[in-house]
Image (cartoon, grey):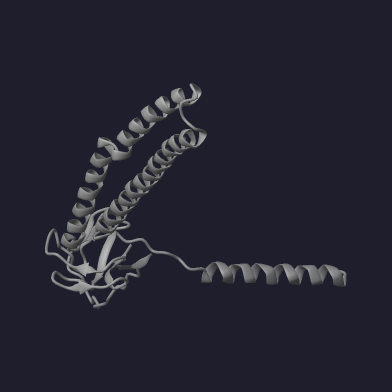
Amino acid sequence: SLPFWLKLIAVLAVLGAIVEGVRHYLRPVAKVETVISGDAVDAEPGSLTVKEKYSMQMKSAIAGRVLNKDYKLDTGVLVKEGEILVHLDTSGLEIGLEQVHNEYEAAKQRIALGSAQSYALETALSDFKNTSRLFKMGQLSDSEYQKSRRAVETIKQQLALEKVRDDEDLKTDENTIKDKQYHIDLMTIRAPFSGIVSAVNAHPGDLINFGDPIITMIT
């Protein structure tokens, strides 16, 4: 008779073959059918929910009244990056901007004409030249000479102070113009990215404040 260990190997081989046969029989099989167009049979109604990748609520960076100009916001509208969404009324700021512009131009014209102190300096320099000549000739005292010299220095200091004030005035007007123009630019609200309008919170005629929501955009 066969040794016991050979019998054990034979039994295990038979069991392995049986297990493999069962696995092969039970494996899933995909059956491919030819697609034929036609009416759906036993179709069931359903719904599909699409979740946005990114959502952003745009808020106003400045207060103002929403204008009807170029207004076309509505839910579901596709907008492109940089496209104008809302115009706010800029009339008040534009009046102030024009006023500052006028003051700025007037200041430049005044400076271009020159200070009245410039003519006073010319006279003082002429007097000092004559005083110096007489002083050297011994015909004027030292106090008179010093008085004439101080008059020239005083006018020079006044001219220097006037220049500082003029430069400050021009710089102030330039900064005011930039500030008003910046706020005017804020009142034209543009899309920060391309997307779809999912909610509209501001409509023509609405008076909105800083931080009020305008629209919600999704991508």
Q: In this orientation, does residue 83 appear?
A: yes
Between 121 and 9, which is closer to the camera in this rendering?
A: 121
- Residue 174 horizontal/vertical position (percent): 31, 48
Q: Is residue 16 above or below residue 154?
A: below
**8 with respect to 217 (left or right):** right
Q: In this orientation, does residue 81 appear?
A: no
Q: Quadrant of residue 54?
A: bottom left
**Residue at x-position 62% and y-position 67%:** 20
- Residue 114 horizontal/vertical position (percent): 28, 36
Q: Is residue 95 above or below residue 12?
A: above
**Residue at x-position 42% and y-position 38%:** 151
Q: Is residue 194 above or below residue 130?
A: below
**Residue at x-position 46% and y-position 26%:** 139
Can you say which quadrant of the picture contains the N terminus?
A: bottom right
**Residue at x-position 38% and y-position 64%:** 31
Q: Residue furthest front?
A: 139
Q: Residue furthest left?
A: 68
**18 with respect to 82 (left or right):** right
- Residue 192 horizontal/vertical position (percent): 32, 57
